[in-house]
Each structure stands twice: as C-alpha cells, then as structure tokens.
Amino acid sequence: MRQTQELGLREEVLLKASQLAKIAARAAEEKNAEDILVLNVAQLLVVTDFFIICTGSSTRQVRAIADNVREKLAAKGRKPFSVEGKDKLQWVLLDYSDLIVHIFDKPTRDYYQLERLWIDAPSLDWAVKPAKKK
C-alpha cells in the first residue's frame, strides 16, 4: 500500500514538474529562443526530472530568455536554487531542482551538444496547440 502511495506521489510531482517545464519552454519562446527542447530525464537521472534546452542568438537574447523564464516561474512561486553563467552569457543554467533550464548561445550549444548526451530521454511536447475550428 505504501509503495503505491509513493508511486502516486511521484507521478504527481512529475506532473507538476512537467507543467513548470512547459511554462519555462513557453517563456523562452516568448523571447524568440531557438531549438527549444524539453527532455524528460526522470528515468535517467536522480537529480532532476526535466531539462529545458534552448538557444539565444546573442548575449542580449540569452539574458532576456533567462530573465523571462525566471519571471514566469517566479509568478508560479518558484525561484531557482542556483543560477550559473549570467556573467558570460554563453551557457546560463537555471536550477529549479526538478527542472534545469539550459540557455546557450549558438557556438556553445553546438560545442556541447547536450541533447546528444541525453538522446535516450523522451521529449515533452510543450507547444500550445491551436484551438480546433468548428
């Protein structure tokens, strides 16, 4: 019985994390981030459930994306435990524990190819679906 309850709680936590991951991805999209990818790494890592990976075309855009993600998640009561890379703006990492947002400039993303490291992680469909016309 207890194991079933724990499993149900884990699913609830994952659902909430997936909703926050979608909010983060949409916040990045609002600032014209490119190649936005949301990976469910919950079965592969114990430290987090989702990676959001995206690219900004300039340091100014990388900063704007990071600021918008922080603002949108703060509106949901979430603040990052750690922020790395805000000084050079080549790779900004926002660590929310259950989700980690990676915002790259293009050369840095091309170099590290983070999504290739986690190729076995399923991607999460985060885009808003247009309403069906009647």
Image (spheres, helix red, strand yellow):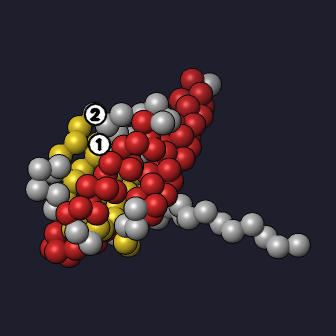
Please tell me whether residue 113 is drawn above or below residue 42 in the rendered image.
Answer: below
Mark 1: few/some/many CA within 10 Å (<14, 14-19, 20+): some
SS category of the residue bearing label 2: loop
The three-letter code of the residue at mark 1 reads Asp
Relative side of 62 to 23, left or right: left
Q: Residue at x 31, y 56 (%)?
A: 64
Q: Earlier in the sequence, mark 2 or mark 1?
A: 2
Q: Residue furthest front?
A: 60
The image position of residue 40, as x and y in percent, is 43, 56
The residue lying toward the viewer, choosing from 31 and 53, is 31
SS category of the residue bearing label 1: strand
Q: Residue at x 22, y 54 (%)?
A: 92
Residue at which label 2 appears: 81
Mark 2 vs mark 1, CA separation in Å: 6 Å
Residue at which label 1 appears: 95
Please tell me whether residue 113 is drawn above or below residue 46 in the rendered image.
Answer: below
Count of numbered labels shown in the rendering: 2
